[in-house]
Image: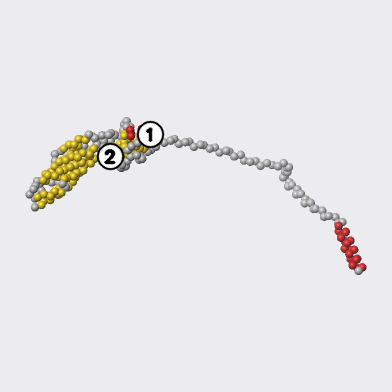
Amino acid sequence: MRNRLWVMVVVISFGLSSCNLPAPQATETPLTPPMPGTPTSSIATSTRTPVTTPLSFELPTPAPTSTPSVFLASPRDQPVNCRFGPGISYAVIGALIIGRQAEMIGRNSDSTWWYVRNPSDPSTSCWLSAEFVQTVGDVESLPVVNPPEIMVTGVRVRVDPPVLYVACDAFPQVVTISADITASGPSTVVWHWESSTGVVSPDKQVVFAAGDTKTVQDYYRVTAVNDYRIQVQTTLPNIMTGQASLKVICTP
């Protein structure tokens, strides 16, 4: 018992003495001395910011407005005839209907007629009266086109009857030769017919007051059984031909 008390006294004494020990002091880290020849300054050095030269911008120059390269014509309020030449005496060869446009490629000297691609057949050209169409573009810059030469544009031939049945002793017989001749404008057309047997008619004339189609007729005297070819040809104002066939059959 006495030993146990003694041990306790020793422990308590040791605890009280440890409370009075001095606290450990912080160790100072020595400053690094400046290197010789290296100046020190307490004033902060400012960093220079590079000056950027402002970019200069040039506004684009507006391109001049160009004149449209395509000129168009359209009907004002009704379909318009497109003619072979600049005048109502020329034949009608096409039409410009409501809702359609025609490309303009020329004009006459006083700009009263426009030369256009035929709206009914773009592979050909014709003329529209300026009075009845409205246009797009500087049409006065279009080239002046001279009126076309008036000519025959078609010959269609038929023989009546195309097949002739006749008694072998009933020759001669007469058949009718008819030809539809189309001229593009006012003109006098000279024409004749000839058969495959070598018979040729005298020259004949038909007068056109305007572009139109006229029917001419003549008669052919058949003297024998044969297969005939009948040709009608114009010689003025230009050469144009058409032909038809005739078959003659003899019955005993």
Q: Nearer the viewer, mark 2 or mark 1?
A: 2
Q: Residue at the spot x=73%, y=47% of the render?
A: 35
Q: Nearer the viewer, residue 149 or 84?
A: 84
The reply, left or right, for residue 166 in relation to residue 51 is left
In the image, residue 181 lies at what x, y percent? 21, 40
Q: Nearer the viewer, residue 32 or 68?
A: 68
Give the residue pinned by disc 1.
138
Q: Residue at the spot x=10%, y=52% of the render?
A: 251
Element type at marker 2?
A: strand
Please state, as top left, top right, bottom left or bottom right, where the N terminus lies in the image: bottom right
The reply, left or right, for residue 15 in relation to residue 244 is right
Q: Residue at the spot x=28%, y=33% of the render?
A: 87
Residue 175 sits in which quadrant? top left
Q: Nearer the viewer, residue 48 or 200?
A: 200
In the image, residue 40 lies at what x, y percent? 73, 43
- 10 Å crowding of disc 1: few (<14), some (14-19), many (20+): few
Task: Give the residue type that dot 1 points to.
Answer: Asp
Task: Give the residue type that dot 2 points to.
Answer: Ile
Q: Residue at the spot x=58%, y=38% of the render?
A: 53
The reply, left or right, for residue 199 in relation to residue 91 is left
Q: Is residue 47 visible?
A: yes
Q: Residue furthest left?
A: 169
Q: Is residue 125 visible?
A: no
Q: Residue furthest right?
A: 2
Disc assigned to residue 38: none
Residue 194 sits in which quadrant? top left
Q: Residue furthest top?
A: 110
Give the residue pinned by disc 2.
93
In the image, residue 8 lies at what x, y percent? 89, 64
In the image, residue 62 lies at what x, y percent? 47, 36
Element type at marker 1?
A: loop
